[in-house]
Image (cartoon, rainbow, N blue to C red):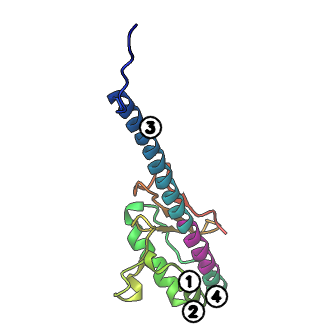
């Protein structure tokens, strides 16, 4: 009769299985965390779009028009955003709405108001375009990849 010898130790295979399970769980946690962070940033952009939309409405009520910006070239997003900020800041009712924006989104705050602009949480300038035949200005965030014209771009829904 053979005697079974079982030591109280852990085999290498058991350790590898446990390590594999831990790695899979860690991967799931990291993936979920990154997605939650991304959704939070998207919510910040949507909130900024809502506030900017309100500021644009206030501007329109006071001046009868939106700040003109017909160029549709996202390579010039910063000058577009500077123009929008300058125009909205010049109108008192719009300025009051701008003051509600998350201050971390407003860049160049040490400079004059006509050189300030608004960025998304990823650090990319929010583009502003409005032509007279448009019903409402278009605001665009490049999204997490920081490149305009890709699937992750965030665009205001209008009014």
In the picture of the structure, the residue carrying the numbered disc 4 is 62
Q: Decide if residue 26 is in sight here.
A: yes
Q: Quadrant of the C terminus?
A: bottom right
Q: Are marks 4 and 2 in contact (CB under 8 Å)?
A: yes
Horizontal and vertical percent position of residue 38:
49, 58
**Residue in front for this viewpoint, 80 or 104:** 104
Say which label, 2 or 3, has the lower sequence index: 3
In the picture of the structure, the residue carrying the numbered disc 3 is 21
Give the spatial CA distance, label 4 vs label 1.
19 Å
In the picture of the structure, the residue carrying the numbered disc 2 is 92
Q: Decide if residue 150 is in sight here.
A: no
Q: Quadrant of the N terminus?
A: top left
In the picture of the structure, the residue carrying the numbered disc 1 is 100
Q: Are marks 3 and 1 in contact (CB under 8 Å)?
A: no
**Residue in front for this viewpoint, 130 or 84:** 84
Give the spatial CA distance, label 2 vs label 3.
59 Å
**Residue in front for this viewpoint, 124 or 9:** 9
**Residue in front for this viewpoint, 59 or 45:** 45
Say which label, 3 or 4, has the lower sequence index: 3
Mark 3 secondary-structure assignment:
helix
Q: Is residue 28 left or right of residue 123?
A: right
Horizontal and vertical percent position of residue 66:
58, 77
Q: Is residue 105 above or below residue 148?
A: below
Taking the view exactly as shown, the residue that stands out farthest to the bottom is 92
Horizontal and vertical percent position of residue 153:
50, 55
């Amino acid at each position: 009769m053979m005697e079974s010898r079982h030591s109280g130790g852990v085999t290498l295979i058991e350790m590898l299985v446990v390590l594999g399970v831990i790695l899979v769980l860690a991967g799931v946690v990291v993936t979920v965390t990154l997605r939650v962070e991304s959704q939070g940033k998207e919510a910040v952009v949507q909130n900024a779009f809502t506030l900017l939309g309100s500021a644009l409405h206030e501007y329109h009520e006071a001046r009868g028009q939106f700040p003109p910006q017909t160029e549709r070239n996202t390579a010039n997003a910063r000058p577009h955003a500077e123009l929008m900020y300058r125009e909205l800041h010049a109108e008192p009712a719009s300025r009051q709405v701008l003051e509600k924006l998350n201050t971390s989104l407003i860049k160049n705050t040490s400079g004059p108001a006509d050189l300030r602009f608004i960025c998304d949480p990823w650090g990319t300038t929010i583009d502003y375009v409005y032509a007279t035949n448009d019903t409402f200005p278009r605001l665009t965030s490049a999204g997490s990849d920081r490149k305009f014209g890709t699937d992750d771009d965030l665009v205001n829904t209008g009014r």
